[in-house]
Amino acid sequence: MAEIDQVTASILEKIDGEGFKQEGAYNLRYNGYSLCHGNTEHIKIKRKEDKQGIDVYISGDAKGEQVHIPVVVAASGMVDEVYNDFYIGDGAEVTIVAGCGIHNSGCNDSRHDGIHTFHVGKNANVRYEEKHYGEGEGTGARILNPVTKIIMEEHSVFTLDTAQIKGVDSTKRETEVIMGEDSKLFVVEKLMTHGQQSAVSNMDVSLNGAGSSAQIVSRSVAKGNSKQIFHPKAIGNAPCHAHIQCDSIIMDQARVCSIPEIDANHVDAAIIHEAAIGRINNEQLIKLNTFGLSEEAAEAVIIENFLN
Amino acid sequence: MLEVKNLVFHPVDNGVEKSIIEGISFTVKDGEMLVITGPNGGGKSTMAKLLMGIEPLDEGTIMLDGVDITDYSIAQRANAGIGFAFQQPPRFKGMTVSRFLSLAAGEELPERKCCDLLSGVGLCAREYLNREVDGTLSGGEMKRLEIASVLAKPHKICIFDEPEAGIDLWSFSMLVKQFEELHAGKKESLILISHQERIIQMADRIMVIKDGKISALGPKEEVFPDLVDKDTGCICGNQRHKA
């Protein structure tokens, strides 16, 4: 079993909500190399030969299994670009827990670009969790630029649950989803920025198959002088349903720009979007004050639950 | 005991000073139920908010068990033992019902206790524990949850602002039963703002507020007969609750 230092263990606690163990199917990428990895009967992880990254093969016999593939960047000034491809067999039921944590205690920028592609087989059901987190006392920036492509075959279900908890100075997220017949997509994107941080999230969801449906929910809190831009786009190319909901709390001198876009190319494409940006509701604060919570505690509770 | 002396509230709206509450004084004894009624816009809800510190007093003092709480913040009043149920409770995106009740109780509540609180206000507990306190709950459900939040921990005095508003007949009966049990226990003093005859009939004393002033205050037996058909805004004479 590989030895994991204290900084890495602490970051793993933040980015792997299920709890990282060197058991089952897993791959821990540390400062640009694979520190440890394991396979199971139904899940095989192979290192790429031509570039950085792994191929993850999940057989259709995998039912209720988990794959943990966290990334930790603890070296200041490191630029880590990694390509991970997932091949999910027909009928598989799997939870994939990814996530990236950067500890930068130096003065140079640390960056991780995770380029993930998911090939989701027929009737497969995938839950993908990805948490991003940054820490460290250095002046170097902590940068994460994830690219996610999801190709869904018929009757498949994909749940994309992403969260940027804190400490990431700059992020640009690009997500593309291609949906087949009767496939279902659920996206929950949670984001908190503070200080001078900036975050951009672009998402294109093409509902190409008849009966496909997508629900995209984005919740964010912007504090300090931080800036956020959301641009989720649902493109209905067949009889389908899609719902985009962007909800943001804005505080201090922050800026939030929310641009939900809907594009129907079929008469039976039913697509809805809604977006709201506002400060913390005063009535909510007062209600929590009547429970005996101070202003600061009430504010923290509202944010914590909003991003829950 | 709650002692309220000479409450005055004159907010300034668009540069014009308005007279909303004019020198209201009263007491609520330990274990007593005081029902406040009167016409809409008369100042009842504002008075309740002044007691909780939600609106700032211009004049007057508020004493709770001999302690001057006039300058206390809302949270300090809550921690001193005042509970408050809003007429129109706010919603919280992302907060589950069980989390909401735990926050109200000031401690992590076990599932059984949450279920008891919800059942007590007519909500089928298991269906609600993991639901969010957001727009997916109806107005009636929110009201019942609001009342459950006040009942989640013991207080010296609880203030309920029109608890019956938006609640169906069956739940109203359960609510009345809850108030009867609370009142019978005599552990908490109760202030209820209400227009409903069944609630007014439970009072030890009734206070009628009209135009920001007390127009009647006394034992139920004295004040209630004068309420019906008089210009108080109390509609119980016209719409007797059958629940």
Image (cartoon, coloured by chain):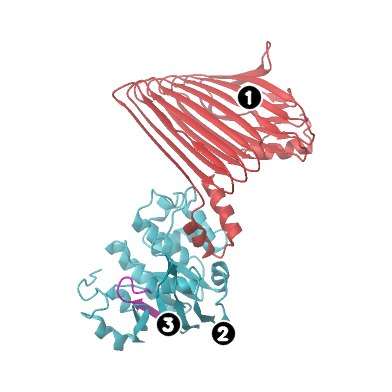
Chain colours: A red, B cyan
Q: Residues within 10 Å of mark 2 (few under 14, many from 20)?
A: few
Secondary structure found at label 2: loop
Q: Which residue is mark 2?
A: B66
Which numbered dot is residue B143?
A: none
Callout 3 and callout 1 share a chain: no
Residue A99 visible in image = no
All told, the count of numbered labels is 3
Looking at the rendered structure, the kind of residue marked 2 is: Gly
In the image, the segment drawn in magenta is B33-43
Residue A202 pos. (x, y %)? 52, 28
Secondary structure found at label 3: strand
Q: Nearer the viewer, mark 3 or mark 1?
A: 3
Looking at the rendered structure, the kind of residue marked 1 is: Gly
Q: Nearer the viewer, mark 3 or mark 2?
A: 3
Q: Quadrant of the C terminus of chain B?
A: bottom left
- Earlier in the chain: of badge 3 and badge 2, it is 3
Q: Nearer the viewer, residue A170 or B239?
A: A170
Q: Nearer the viewer, residue A112 or B138?
A: A112
Callout 3 and callout 2 share a chain: yes
Q: Which residue is mark 1?
A: A114
Looking at the rendered structure, the kind of residue marked 3 is: Ile
From mark 3 to mark 2, how far is it between C-alphas? Answer: 19 Å
Residue A203 pos. (x, y %)? 50, 27
Q: Which residue is mark 3?
A: B24
Above or below, comparing residue B84 to residue A173 in the picture: below
Above or below, comparing residue A11 to residue A90 in the picture: below
Q: Nearer the viewer, residue A185 or B73?
A: B73
Q: Tell me which chain the residue with mark 3 is part of.
A: B
Q: Tell me which chain the residue with mark 1 is part of.
A: A
